[in-house]
Image (cartoon, rainbow, N blue to C red):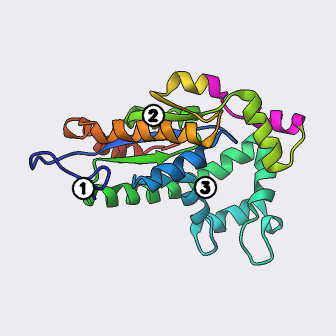
């Protein structure tokens, strides 16, 4: 079996290119990521890393508890993500504070994982970053950007069902993000997840085939650029 992204053509020393993957709340990004992983793609999930770096005994954890208080903790001492999320959702300045604490740690862990795949000889890595298009700091290092899209009524309906929200609450959550219709103008590839799973699967297979056939890794050394970006801000 040939691993996606493995080094390869005619003994040439390849470089790595990066693929940015994003979506919106309840757009179905996790479904697309699961399909890509099944196909053997190297995917780095910024959300998973974000959960890891706020575990007890990490520096980010200590600083979060210092600034936000022990009331955000669960009985086992871990951070109550829902309670913290409610605080930052209604207070933008506190969201900025949280980001200033967690993002440096997330950046370091992401770079470590990218380096791992680079050493293994992968031609490309998919970076799953929820706020890829909102902040626009990483897009210039991506050869391709992929948006998982669904139409607004479907997005609202799925969010209401998934989170048990009223229509007004769902609209407010969606309105706090950059609209998907604006994001789709910024992406190089669109996965439309408005319909059934099989439709989404076919689109993911087409994207996977295109990435596998790409020879951009032979002449686009975007990986070194990311190393420089980490010295600043990834998000």
Label 2 sits on residue: 145
Q: What is the distance, in whole Å, between disc 1 and disc 3 at their CAs?
A: 32 Å
Q: What is the distance, in whole Å, between disc 2 and disc 3 at their CAs?
A: 27 Å
Residue 179, magenta (yes or no): yes
Label 1 sits on residue: 121
Q: Give the percent coordinates (x, y) of residue 14.
A: 19, 46
Q: Residue at x 53, y 38 (%)?
A: 132
> Label 3's element?
helix
> Label 1's element?
loop
Q: Give the percent coordinates (x, y) of residue 179.
A: 67, 27
Q: Is residue 62 above or below residue 37?
A: below
User: Between 83 and 34, which is closer to the camera in this rendering?
Assistant: 34
Q: Residue at x 46, y 54 (%)?
A: 37
Q: Is residue 80 above or below residue 150?
A: below
> Does residue 107 appear in this view?
no
Label 3 sits on residue: 101
User: Between 81 and 39, which is closer to the camera in this rendering?
Assistant: 39
Going from N to C along the chain, the mark reached first, 2 or 1, is 1
Chief SS of the magenta region: helix
Magenta stretch bounds: 167-181
Q: On the image, which quarter does residue 199 sit in? A: top right
Residue 192, magenta (yes or no): no
Mark 2 neighbour class, 10 Å CA radius: few under 14, some 14 to 19, many 20 or more? many
């Amino acid at each position: 079996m040939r691993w996606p992204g493995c080094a390869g053509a005619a003994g040439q020393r390849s470089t790595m290119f990066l693929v940015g993957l994003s979506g919106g709340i309840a757009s179905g990004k996790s479904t697309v990521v699961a399909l890509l992983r099944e196909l053997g793609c190297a995917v780095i999930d910024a959300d998973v890393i974000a959960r890891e770096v706020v575990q007890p005994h990490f520096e980010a954890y200590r600083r979060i508890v210092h600034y936000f208080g022990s009331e955000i903790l669960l009985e086992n001492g871990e951070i109550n993500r829902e309670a913290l999320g409610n605080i930052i959702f209604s207070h933008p300045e506190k969201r900025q504070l949280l980001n200033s604490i967690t993002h440096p740690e997330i950046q370091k862990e992401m770079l470590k994982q990218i380096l791992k795949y680079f050493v293994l000889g992968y031609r490309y890595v998919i970076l799953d970053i929820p706020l890829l298009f909102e902040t626009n700091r990483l897009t210039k290092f991506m050869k391709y950007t992929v948006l998982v899209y669904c139409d607004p009524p479907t997005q609202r309906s799925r969010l209401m069902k998934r989170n048990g929200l009223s229509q007004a609450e769902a609209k407010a959550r969606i309105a706090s993000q950059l609209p998907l219709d604006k994001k789709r103008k910024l992406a190089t590839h669109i996965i439309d997840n408005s319909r059934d799973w099989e439709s989404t699967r076919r689109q993911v297979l087409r994207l996977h085939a295109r990435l596998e056939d790409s020879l951009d890794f032979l002449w686009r050394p975007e990986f070194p650029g990311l190393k420089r970006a980490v010295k600043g801000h990834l998000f």
